[in-house]
Amino acid sequence: MALTNPMPMGPWKITVYDQEYFQGRRMEFTACCQNIMECGMENIRSLKVECGAWVGYEHSSFCGQQFVLEKGDYPRFEAYSGSNSYRIERMISFRPICCAVAAFPLQNHKESRMTIFEMENMMGRQFELCDDYPSLQAMGWMNNEVGSMQIHSGAFVCYQYPGYRGHQYIMECDCHGGEYKCYREFGSHSQTPQIQSIRRIQH
Amino acid sequence: MALTNPMPMGPWKITVYDQEYFQGRRMEFTACCQNIMECGMENIRSLKVECGAWVGYEHSSFCGQQFVLEKGDYPRFEAYSGSNSYRIERMISFRPICCAVAAFPLQNHKESRMTIFEMENMMGRQFELCDDYPSLQAMGWMNNEVGSMQIHSGAFVCYQYPGYRGHQYIMECDCHGGEYKCYREFGSHSQTPQIQSIRRIQH
């Protein structure tokens, strides 16, 4: 990927702060962090994603609610964090999304590809996605659920509600061999197969 | 638009309920509602968007926090509504987004087009958008703010944070002549020019 999208700062970089608005103690990471508290930081209250796409988790060891973090400034983590249906108090672990494809050049758009299935174990009606879909039902999907999915390339984030709201599930081609056979595999916190919007994750 | 995207149920339809999970009193709308309480409904606790894209507001007469509502099911409005930085307790008014372009056929994608400017009054550096951008900084935008914007066609939703999070601003080519000259024109609740992700709104 570095060949098609030169990244002078390296492929991944995130800076976290223990106070809001990028104040207080500061730490930089270029790889995953399994437990921010073991690094001596009690809480993350603001952060900057400087390179790459990341996923944050509410618990250590990449467990619990998950949420995508793309390049930009997050001056108040508390304001950002809520998944609306469930407010996340803390971000304790985080890691790069290694298979997120480069957003530019534009032709790389096509590199993200997945199939959603009506039922568990890749059964029932299916639909192939390679774009962003703020409403699966608007594109013709039959209901508000997805039974299983197969990520062929790249990474996607699936959301409980239309318009990229509610619980998030980060889906990657290089995790589980890209196979998510039932909603319990969507994430450690997933309680239902309800998914109503899906989009690509890009660098 | 009806010519290229036949809509058997009519162009817009939203059904609202005064209890969660589509229970209780139910009302259907095919056009704007300035004050749900004047229709005899105290509160909206769940809703289904059956046709078209809509924008909801926390106050009557289309004021206060705004949020896009696309086709799909919203079984718990309370769970959906939070803009993360500011939890919206109620949806009191709502209206169709008339200039949202059809998501299909795909060639219509190009029909949504806007320009963002570094400074107020369409000044400074500029960038033309006709796609979805979960991180403006990832595509090369210089900072976490947008000074002004011009919507040439279609409708967009701008977000405070990357990844389509935080405060939302619905921008339409047929409102204000498509011109949003400073952040105070972004919405009745806008307090800063901070905008870090932008996407199209489609039927």
Image (tube, coloured by chain):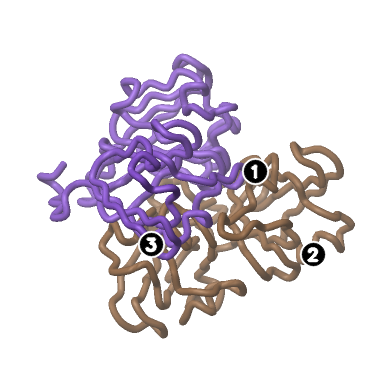
Chain colours: A brown, B purple
Q: Which residue is identified by label 3?
A: B24
Mark nearest the camera among 2 and 3 is 3
Please tell me which residue is depicted at 70% across the width and 60% down the height of the picture: A94
The relative height of residue B158 versus residue A6 in the rendered view (above or below) is above
Tell which tag, 2 or 1, sits nearer the viewer. Answer: 2
Front label number (1 vs 3): 3
CA–CA distance in space, label 2 to label 3 = 45 Å
Q: Is residue A134 above or below residue A187?
A: above
Q: Amino acid at mark 2?
A: Asn
Are labels 2 and 3 on one chain?
A: no
Residue A133, percent across and down? 37, 56
Residue at x 45% of width, y 55% of height: B45
Q: Are marks 2 and 1 in contact (CB under 8 Å)?
A: no
Q: Quadrant of residue A174?
A: bottom right
Chain of the residue on which disc 3 is drawn: B
The kind of secondary structure element at disc 3 is strand
- Please give the chain letter of the residue carrying mark 1: A
Q: Earlier in the sequence, mark 2 or mark 1?
A: 1
Give the x, y percent position of residue B176. Answer: 35, 21
The residue under label 3 is which amino acid type? Gly
Give the class, few, some or many, for how many residues have Cα within 10 Å of label 2's Cα (few <14, many ≥20): some
Q: Are marks 1 and 3 in one subunit? A: no
- Mark 3 neighbour class, 10 Å CA radius: few under 14, some 14 to 19, many 20 or more: few
Q: Which residue is mark 2?
A: A35
* Picture layout, residue B158 above or below residue A165: above
Residue at numbered disc 1: A8
Cα distance, mark 1 to mark 3? 57 Å
For residue B142, say whether it is visible.
yes
The quarter in which the N terminus of chain B is drawn is top left
Q: Residue at x 44, y 69 (%)?
A: A194
Which residue sits furthest front? Answer: B40
